[in-house]
Amino acid sequence: MIITYQQAEIPYIFDADGERLWTYAHMNLIIPWFFIHYEKEVDDQIIGCQIMLFKVGQIEQLTLDPTVLVKSIYLVSPGYVNQTNEWSMDIIKSLSIGTDENGTLEQSIARYELANCKFYYYPEISSQTSYKKIADIYNHLK
Protein backbone atom coordinates (compact mmCIF):
# COMPACT_ATOMS: atom_id res chain seq x y z
CA MET A 1 0.00 0.00 0.00
CA ILE A 2 2.88 2.35 0.73
CA ILE A 3 5.92 2.52 -1.49
CA THR A 4 9.21 3.83 -0.14
CA TYR A 5 12.22 4.95 -2.13
CA GLN A 6 15.89 4.60 -1.30
CA GLN A 7 16.54 8.29 -2.02
CA ALA A 8 13.97 9.18 0.69
CA GLU A 9 15.66 7.10 3.39
CA ILE A 10 17.25 8.94 6.31
CA PRO A 11 20.34 7.37 7.90
CA TYR A 12 19.29 6.21 11.36
CA ILE A 13 22.06 5.43 13.82
CA PHE A 14 19.75 3.84 16.41
CA ASP A 15 18.52 1.04 14.13
CA ALA A 16 16.29 -0.83 16.58
CA ASP A 17 14.61 -3.96 15.27
CA GLY A 18 15.15 -3.08 11.62
CA GLU A 19 13.42 0.32 11.87
CA ARG A 20 14.06 2.73 9.03
CA LEU A 21 13.15 6.39 8.56
CA TRP A 22 11.85 7.99 5.37
CA THR A 23 11.31 11.63 4.40
CA TYR A 24 8.34 10.58 2.27
CA ALA A 25 6.38 7.59 1.07
CA HIS A 26 4.08 7.07 -1.89
CA MET A 27 0.57 5.71 -1.40
CA ASN A 28 -0.49 3.79 -4.48
CA LEU A 29 -4.17 3.19 -3.66
CA ILE A 30 -6.98 5.71 -3.28
CA ILE A 31 -8.59 4.18 -0.22
CA PRO A 32 -9.44 5.36 3.30
CA TRP A 33 -6.74 4.99 5.94
CA PHE A 34 -6.31 5.86 9.61
CA PHE A 35 -3.94 8.08 11.59
CA ILE A 36 -3.98 6.95 15.20
CA HIS A 37 -2.58 8.63 18.30
CA TYR A 38 -2.11 6.30 21.23
CA GLU A 39 -0.16 5.84 24.43
CA LYS A 40 1.75 2.64 25.15
CA GLU A 41 3.20 1.39 28.40
CA VAL A 42 6.83 0.37 27.95
CA ASP A 43 9.00 -0.54 30.95
CA ASP A 44 6.65 1.27 33.36
CA GLN A 45 6.70 4.43 31.22
CA ILE A 46 3.91 5.87 29.07
CA ILE A 47 5.10 6.66 25.55
CA GLY A 48 3.06 8.74 23.07
CA CYS A 49 2.93 7.13 19.63
CA GLN A 50 1.35 7.67 16.22
CA ILE A 51 0.71 5.07 13.55
CA MET A 52 -0.84 4.92 10.09
CA LEU A 53 -3.07 1.89 9.51
CA PHE A 54 -5.11 0.73 6.54
CA LYS A 55 -7.33 -2.04 7.88
CA VAL A 56 -10.11 -2.03 10.47
CA GLY A 57 -8.77 -5.32 11.84
CA GLN A 58 -5.49 -3.59 12.67
CA ILE A 59 -7.39 -1.02 14.74
CA GLU A 60 -9.21 -3.80 16.52
CA GLN A 61 -5.90 -5.49 17.39
CA LEU A 62 -4.49 -2.21 18.68
CA THR A 63 -7.53 -1.53 20.89
CA LEU A 64 -7.35 -5.04 22.37
CA ASP A 65 -3.73 -4.60 23.48
CA PRO A 66 -3.84 -4.04 27.28
CA THR A 67 -0.68 -1.90 27.15
CA VAL A 68 -2.23 0.55 24.67
CA LEU A 69 -4.60 3.45 25.24
CA VAL A 70 -5.99 4.88 21.99
CA LYS A 71 -6.31 8.64 22.37
CA SER A 72 -7.76 9.48 18.94
CA ILE A 73 -8.36 7.97 15.53
CA TYR A 74 -8.56 10.07 12.39
CA LEU A 75 -10.15 8.79 9.21
CA VAL A 76 -8.30 10.02 6.14
CA SER A 77 -10.81 9.56 3.35
CA PRO A 78 -10.75 10.20 -0.39
CA GLY A 79 -13.51 12.25 -2.00
CA TYR A 80 -15.55 9.27 -3.15
CA VAL A 81 -15.98 8.23 0.50
CA ASN A 82 -16.60 11.68 2.02
CA GLN A 83 -18.80 12.87 -0.88
CA THR A 84 -16.46 15.73 -1.87
CA ASN A 85 -13.77 16.12 -4.49
CA GLU A 86 -11.04 16.30 -1.85
CA TRP A 87 -9.26 14.19 0.71
CA SER A 88 -10.46 14.82 4.26
CA MET A 89 -9.09 14.04 7.72
CA ASP A 90 -11.77 13.69 10.41
CA ILE A 91 -11.81 12.46 14.01
CA ILE A 92 -13.68 9.19 14.39
CA LYS A 93 -16.20 9.06 17.23
CA SER A 94 -17.03 5.38 16.70
CA LEU A 95 -16.24 2.59 14.27
CA SER A 96 -18.21 -0.59 13.68
CA ILE A 97 -18.35 -3.36 11.11
CA GLY A 98 -21.47 -4.84 9.67
CA THR A 99 -23.24 -5.96 6.56
CA ASP A 100 -26.22 -4.91 4.51
CA GLU A 101 -29.59 -5.83 6.01
CA ASN A 102 -30.41 -8.21 3.15
CA GLY A 103 -27.05 -9.96 3.26
CA THR A 104 -26.45 -9.39 -0.45
CA LEU A 105 -22.92 -8.02 -0.04
CA GLU A 106 -20.22 -10.65 0.38
CA GLN A 107 -17.85 -8.42 2.35
CA SER A 108 -18.18 -6.57 5.61
CA ILE A 109 -18.87 -2.84 5.68
CA ALA A 110 -17.09 -0.39 7.94
CA ARG A 111 -19.26 2.38 9.39
CA TYR A 112 -17.44 5.50 10.57
CA GLU A 113 -19.26 7.93 12.85
CA LEU A 114 -17.31 11.17 12.87
CA ALA A 115 -17.02 13.82 15.58
CA ASN A 116 -18.94 16.20 13.28
CA CYS A 117 -21.91 13.74 13.40
CA LYS A 118 -21.48 12.56 9.80
CA PHE A 119 -21.48 8.88 8.87
CA TYR A 120 -19.40 7.27 6.14
CA TYR A 121 -19.45 3.68 4.94
CA TYR A 122 -16.68 1.75 3.24
CA PRO A 123 -17.20 0.13 0.91
CA GLU A 124 -19.93 2.54 0.00
CA ILE A 125 -23.54 1.44 0.28
CA SER A 126 -26.51 3.06 -1.39
CA SER A 127 -28.97 5.13 0.60
CA GLN A 128 -31.57 2.39 0.00
CA THR A 129 -29.37 -0.22 1.71
CA SER A 130 -29.87 -0.79 5.42
CA TYR A 131 -26.75 -1.29 7.51
CA LYS A 132 -26.77 -4.14 10.06
CA LYS A 133 -24.08 -3.79 12.72
CA ILE A 134 -22.14 -6.93 13.61
CA ALA A 135 -19.52 -5.55 16.03
CA ASP A 136 -18.22 -2.36 17.58
CA ILE A 137 -14.51 -1.86 16.92
CA TYR A 138 -13.86 1.52 18.54
CA ASN A 139 -15.79 4.03 20.57
CA HIS A 140 -14.11 7.27 21.63
CA LEU A 141 -16.31 7.48 24.74
CA LYS A 142 -15.08 4.18 26.22
Image (spheres, rainbow, N blue to C red):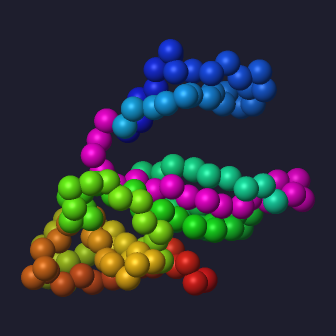
Where residue 74 sits: x, y (%)? Answer: 48, 62
Q: Quadrant of the N terminus?
A: top left
Q: Is residue 85 visible?
A: yes
Q: Residue at x 57, y 50 (%)?
A: 51
Q: Residue at x 61, y 59 (%)?
A: 37
Could you tell whether 99 is left or right of 90 in the image? left
Where residue 105 sits: x, y (%)? Answer: 16, 69
Could you tell whether 101 is left or right of 32 in the image? left
Extreme residue toward the top, this view = 7
**Residue 68's image quarter?**
bottom right
Q: Residue at x 48, y 51 (%)?
A: 53
Extreme residue toward the left, this view = 128
Where residue 43 sits: x, y (%)? Answer: 88, 53
Could you tell whether 14 is left or right of 93 in the image? right
Q: Is residue 58 visible?
A: no
Magenta region, residue range: 28-45
Q: Is 129 above or below relative to 16?
A: below
Query: Does the magenta-highlighted stretch encompass residue 71?
Result: no
Where residue 15 sits: x, y (%)? Answer: 74, 25
Main secondary structure found in the magenta portion? strand
Q: Quadrant of the C terminus?
A: bottom right
**Residue 134's image quarter?**
bottom left
* Callout count: 0
Query: Does the magenta-highlighted stretch encompass residue 37?
Result: yes
**Residue 86's image quarter?**
bottom left
Extreme residue toward the right, this view = 44
